[in-house]
Image (spheres, rainbow, N blue to C red):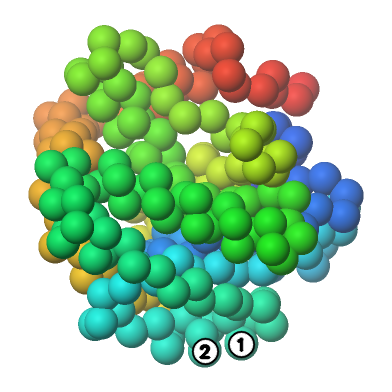
Amino acid sequence: MDIRKLLSYARQAADDYNLIEENDKIAVGISGGKDSVTLLYALKKLQRFYPRHFELTAITIHPGFEEFDLKPLEVFCEELDVPYEIVPTQIAEIVFQEKKSKSPCSLCAKLRKGAFGEAAKKHGCNKIAYAHHRDDLIETMLLSLFYEGQFHSFSPKTKLERTGMTLIRPLIYVPEAEVIGFQRRYQIPSVTNPCPADGHTKRQYIKELLKKLNQDNPGIKNRMFAAIHSASFEDWPQINV
């Protein structure tokens, strides 16, 4: 995938769901993985020609792992000329030592979201952007179907009542394989996730299952995405036509 195709995906999502409005200040959550760094890059490039003016700031919630080296992200944000803040936390200690949670991912996500929301609000942001892509959308639907008995997935745009901000997902149309190809082609930096629970979750199981399903049934991910996209979920905004 080249930069033009990435921007086409991002702009289509922004236009379809009115993700970006005039004078938005958007906080982009940077975890260090390929998806979030690609999102920041896409929004920065989109900023140059999008018909609505918006500002960006990048935020990383540091969970407290000593081996979490964020220097590549600092350099990347400096090159993009995007303000960047690293928010130190004790999330790793809370999750793995104090609570010793049986569901570390759920607790960690809750704590990180809270810290990110506070940091975004401090920067005067009215929107926060997550880097969930098309495969994440499908995986979440399967998780909901398998473990909750519901056909549902997250929305491209969600009003967060507690903070008053709006959550947007501009990469919702981008297949993960194309994110991987983009990162390699443009040498987009990423940092290794030091979390000991990484790769040992229900989501990882679903990710591997989906990969196998798509190998055995070519195009099944496209059909699943089409089913989600055409469903009338109550919490999804109406698509612009």
The residue beneath circle 2 is 75
25 with respect to 172 (left or right):
right
- Up the image or down, 75 lies above or below 162; here it is below
Residue 7: in sight, yes or no?
no
Marks 1 & 2, CB-CB < 8 Å contact = yes
Residue 78: in sight, yes or no?
yes
Secondary structure under tag 1 reads helix
The residue beneath circle 1 is 79
**Farthest-out residue, front:** 98
Q: Position of residue 185 (x, y in %)?
A: 42, 73
Query: Which residue type does callout 2 highlight?
Result: Val
Residue at 36%, 40% (x, y): give it.
135
| Residues packed near mark 1 inside 10 Å, few (<14), some (14 to 19) or many (20 plus) | few
Residue at 27%, 24% (x, y): give it.
142
Which quadrant is the C terminus positioned in?
top right
87 with respect to 160 (left or right):
left
Residue at 54%, 29% (x, y): give it.
155
Q: Position of residue 18 (x, y in %)?
A: 75, 36
100 with respect to 46 (left or right):
left
Query: Which residue type does callout 1 highlight?
Result: Glu
| Residues packed near mark 2 inside 10 Å, few (<14), some (14 to 19) or many (20 plus) | few
Secondary structure under tag 2 reads helix
Q: Position of residue 147 (x, y in %)?
A: 21, 20
- Up the image or down, 52 lies above or below 18; here it is below
Q: Compare residues 118 and 85 and report the one nearer the observer.
A: 118
Residue at 37%, 40% (x, y): give it.
136
Q: Quadrant of residue 122?
A: bottom right
Label 1, label 2: how many angstroms apart (C-alpha)?
6 Å
Q: Quadrant of residue 138?
A: top left
